[in-house]
Amino acid sequence: MKKVLLLKGYSNYNVLRYWIDSLARGFEKLGIETIVLDTIHSINEQIIATLQMDVDAVISFNGILTDQQEILNKIVKAPYIFLLIDHPINHLGRIQNLREEDIITLMDRYDVHNLELFGLKPKNVYMLPHAAIELSMEPYEKTIDILVSGSYSDMSNYKEYINRQSPAIRAICEEVIENCLSDSTRYYIEEFLEAFKKRDITIELRLYETPEFIKMVYDIGRYVYSINRLKVITALAEAGYSLDIYGDNWASSPLVIYPNVHIHESVNYWQTQELMRKSKIVMNFQALLRDGTHERIFAGMAANSVVVTNETPYLRELFSENEEIIFYNFDNLGGMIESIQAILLDDGRRERISKAAWQAVKGLHTFEERAQMIVDIFNDVKLSNHEML
């Protein structure tokens, strides 16, 4: 790989724009000529002309422009590397448009199975996790006990959606929610399929054949995530811990009644990085992931903070429990409370874990290192195609 084109587009709080810049630095350090096309601030003619340049690969987070099949088929000549950083259900149309030579990377190994459920079988599928954008090099005073970031979801909106369904579908939705909330090992997509199977209803998650069903699965998944996240934060609030929450709409949440919960307006991406550096504990919630991880884990560790997160098999492979990271289970929040109390009462242990976490991320889990992983993936596909000739 000698020359790549990176596509930069819109994202909440400009997160993905910063990630692209970090990825570009990684490619440049590898000696790869790197072009960054800002699709937001370019006119159509500029975009078309740049896409026609002679490069080894076109790369973007979440497949910018792949929703326009004509551009992908007629203009983009190089392999397109689609770095998926969400659940596949958010980008099914874009994934469906990928060509045989294109590559898709996933943030969750289980999403290979999810793609098959949605009737999608891209040829070149690889795992590429999120990463930290940078390592904190300077010591910071830890003035925040527990940091929570992200927007609050009003669960009543999902309830209204469920109540609009037919009685039979509403019963299935409620069954799926109850099963997933009572046992966090159960997965909402599979629970839907099982619920239909139990009722002798045959249904397949095909993209354009069942769009309403896919929307329902998505909404119920978000509802389960929102309930689990609120359950964790409420448990911390009831235990009396000082919580600082940054994000939209929390002022309308049930947490406003707790004097130890400090609710702040949302902040931008760089301000969030700064808050992590000031935090003793960074909370993470990944209720929709089965076998992957999230950027906040790497960012929190890179900020010299202790990350507390629900576990996945992939995370257990990456980091040592109670030495580099703290795991909790949605079904045993009492254990989580005890772990957090032990950390907050023992500065020496907290500092040992945070330093070990920082070392675990260093040289392995920033987006600059992900550039090398992308090169390795590209070369693996190229070698496989050569061997098939």
Image: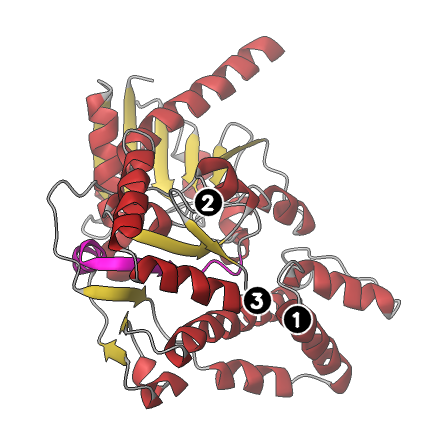
Location of the N terminus by quadrant is top left
Q: Outermost residue toward the right?
A: 200
Give the x, y percent position of residue 244: 26, 72
| Label 1 element class | helix
Give the x, y percent position of residue 260: 28, 81
Which residue is under mark 2? 321
Give yes or no for contact between labels 3 and 1 (Cβ–Cβ under 8 Å).
no
What's the distance in space between the residues labelled 3 and 1, CA to CA?
A: 14 Å
Q: As displayed, is residue 43 above or below residue 99?
A: below
- Classify mark 2: residues with Cα within 10 Å, few (<14), some (14-19) or many (20+): some
- Decide which of tag 2 and tag 1 comes sooner along the chain: 1
Which residue is under mark 3? 221
- Rendered image quadrant of residue 76: top left
Which is in the foreground here, disc 3 or disc 1? 1
Give the extent of the magenta segment: 269-288
Which residue is under mark 1? 182
Q: Amino acid at mark 1?
A: Ser
| Label 3 element class | helix
In front of the other: 285 or 3: 285
* Relative horizontal placement of residue 40, taking residue 80 as reference (left or right): left
- Rendered image quadrant of residue 360: top left
What's the distance in space between the residues labelled 2 and 1, CA to CA?
A: 24 Å
* Relative horizontal placement of residue 166, taking residue 76 as reference (left or right): right
Which is in the foreground here, disc 3 or disc 2? 2
Give the x, y percent position of residue 261: 29, 79
Q: Outermost residue toward the bottom?
A: 257
Q: As displayed, is residue 198 above or below residue 258?
A: above
Label drawn at residue 138:
none
- Decide which of tag 3 and tag 2 comes sooner along the chain: 3
Which is in the foreground here, disc 2 or disc 1? 2
| Label 2 element class | loop
In front of the other: 19 or 257: 257
